[in-house]
Amino acid sequence: MEKKSQESKKGLTHREVPPVVVLLLAMALMNTLLYLCLDQFFISPQHSTVDPSHCPFGYFRMGQMKNCSPWLSCEELRTEVRQLKRVGEGAVKRVFLSEWKERKVALSRLTSLEMKDDFLHGLQMLKSLQSKYVVTLLGYCEDDNTVLTEYHPLGSLSNLEETLNLSKYQHVNTWQARLQLAMDYVGIINYLHNSPLGTLVMCDSNDLRKTLSQYLLTSNFSIVANDLDALPLVNHSSRMFVKCGHRELHGDFVAPEQLWPYGEDLPFHDDLMPSYDEKIDIWKIPDVSSFLLGHVEGSDMVRFHLFDIHKACKSKTPAERPTAQDILDTYQKVLNSLRDTVMPQTREML
């Protein structure tokens, strides 16, 4: 009995955990939780991985939909979609906030028959380029000249500052979130330059505000291309280049090769205007990115680290400009570098 009692005491001693070990474990757990909280606080929100391209061609999925649905037909657009109010208008189409099966959607209608070719081109681009980079197509009716797409309540990217000034979005008004938006923008340009259709140029971008209006800001603070009515194709192997419109362009925002090269002595004539390639999009990236970065704490630090790649974008010689992929890689390196530098310093302060 005595021997069993001693063995029992030894077993109990082996199972007891010293108080100091409990304290150390508790401190380790607190540190882990603090680290995770800091990551959530300092790193910009994760973007949704839901991608319309996960559905077969001719199908869509949006929001909380679990299954893919076929694009809506003319009959379904006429009977199932309820038009609510006009929320936008351009040269090619009017956009109406509408409702389909208790979901908010955007219904676009052709403004005039003169613009039908542009309207149909935009529809063809929407159909062919469905991906995480492009607004989700829900249906269309060529007979009625209507297109139905996913509705994004934050609207055009040109509204970014007004949106971030709202108190509910102050938590994403950081250099990290803004740099991620710039990466989204460059990612779209990169996708267009390497699209399934070939090298496409975002032609409807002759000034900053017009460029921003071609994109939508989603509720999870990512960017999708929305207006694809002017996406001509470049083919370097066959020497097929583009001209964005048939009028003379002015200003520093457009690339030098888009300006009339013959001076004031020779009046502008579209037939004499040289064509150009996708590098006009690269020239504009620094201006768009600067707008997206804004003037929050840390944005000037980001601009400093992007100075060299942005300088290269502004080369007068188009061939010397980097590709969109080069720029995207640089943005990612800067984001990783600054995040790794700033966050440890902040944790040490805490």
Image (cartoon, rainbow, N blue to C red):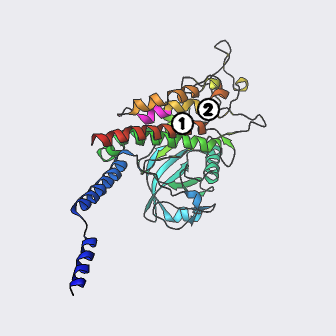
Q: Work out whether 255 lies above or below 159.
A: above
Q: Is residue 214 visible?
A: no
What label does residue 330 carry, if any?
1
Q: Work out whether 77 lies above or below 229.
A: below
The residue depicted at 66 percent of the width and 12 percent of the height is 265
Residue 198: x and y, percent?
Answer: 69, 44
Looking at the rendered image, the disc whose residue lies closer to the viewer, 1 or 2, is 1
Amino acid type, mark 1: Thr
Q: Quadrant of residue 111?
A: top right
- Magenta span has 336? no
Viewer-nearest residue: 209 or 97: 209
The residue depicted at 55 percent of the width and 43 percent of the height is 187
Q: Work out whether 265 lies above or below 122.
A: above
- Magenta span has 295? yes
Residue 196: x and y, percent?
Answer: 67, 49
Mark 1, Cα crowd under 10 Å, few <14 / some 14-19 / many 20+, is: some
Residue 184: x and y, percent?
Answer: 51, 43
- The residue most toward the top is 265
In this rendering, position of residue 118 left or right of residue 186: right
Amino acid type, mark 2: Pro
Viewer-nearest residue: 257 or 170: 170
- The residue most toward the front is 3
Measure the alpha-carbon separation of dots 1 and 2. 11 Å
What label does residue 248 carry, if any?
none
Where disc 1 sits, the SS reads helix
Q: Quadrant of the N terminus?
A: bottom left
What label does residue 322 carry, if any?
2
Q: Which residues are magenta?
A: 288-296
How many marks overall? Answer: 2
Q: Are marks 1 and 2 in contact (CB under 8 Å)?
A: yes
Where disc 2 sits, the SS reads loop
